[in-house]
Image (spheres, rainbow, N blue to C red):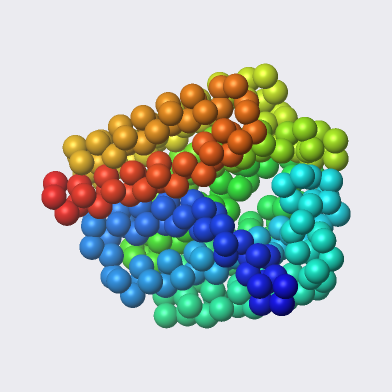
Amino acid sequence: MNKLALYFRLVRADKPIGILLLLWPTLWALWMAAGGTPDWHVVLIFVLGTALMRSAGCAINDYADRDFDRHVKRTVDRPVTSGRIKAWEAVMVAAVLALISFLLILPLNTLTKQLSVVALVVAGTYPYFKRFFAIPQAYLGIAFGFGIPMAFAAIQGQVPAVAWWLLVANIFWAVAYDTEYAMVDRDDDLKIGMRTSAITFGRYDVAAVMLCYGVALAIDLACGWLLGLRWWFVGGVVVAAGMALYHYTLIRDRDRMRCFAAFRHNNWLGAALFAGVALDYALG
């Protein structure tokens, strides 16, 4: 396998679910901040920047976890862990992608640039939180949702309270879907001493996932209503809630592959919420 193909795998370009889970909250925020009509140049900057930063985050994650991943069934064959890419190459790839992402936002205002530095720090430090933080998925939610305050900053030149509440909602959503993901690796994580929400919640993991879905959707609903969104948006939230209930049927028996399927299905939950936002502005 040539280097480009290995780099492709390093940044998970073959697994776009991570990009989508980052992108949906960013798109909600862009539409809400702009009242349904965001500047398409700004949208393009955020879409490209989201893809690049998620890819950079994957490279840093593999660098940080290179000695742990060899003990986990799902990750043992990753390029850095398997030795096909050197650790310094992963750091180089992450640095290049982060630099390109920063160059993309140069046309945007100063506040957005300042927030991008915070986003970079959060993304770069997330892999290390799994060593000591009982629920690192909450920190992941900050990393995956920081496009929300950045979107408001880029469009409005400020970050109103509703943007921070949307970020809180995203934290709860991330805890829900990444706990489903962590349930897949629970046995391996216990052996190597990695901290995850699936381990912390223990036998209450399924209940915790469903509670987090409920809190996230309730906050999203309240934020949308405060911004003047009405029935199309409510419809999107209802569809998303139905999907969350479907996830319960997948994870209740804690089967590894069904938990992984529930995690991947969150792409459609995020899409349903965005469809509700976009349709309400377009047709409401």
Q: Is residue 255 above or below residue 266?
A: above
Residue 23 versus residue 136: which sits nearer the camera? 23
The answer to whether any part of residue 173 appears in the image is yes
Q: Residue at x 53, y 39 (%)?
A: 261
Residue sitting at x 77%, y 56% = 77
Q: Is residue 279 above or below residue 234?
A: below
Horizontal side, residue 18 vs residue 68: left or right: left
Name the outermost residue toward the left.
Answer: 283
Instruction: Locate residue 152: give its quadrant.
Output: bottom left
Residue 239 pos. (x, y %): 31, 35
Please give the name of the residue rendered at 14% of the width and 46% of the height, measured from the top-left corner.
284
Q: x, y percentage for residue 55? A: 60, 65
Residue drawn at (52%, 53%) of the image: 17
Q: Is 23 left or right of 76, judged from the image as shown?
A: left
Instruction: Tell me the quadrant of the picture where the N terminus can be found.
Output: bottom right
Residue 206 drawn above or below residue 51: above
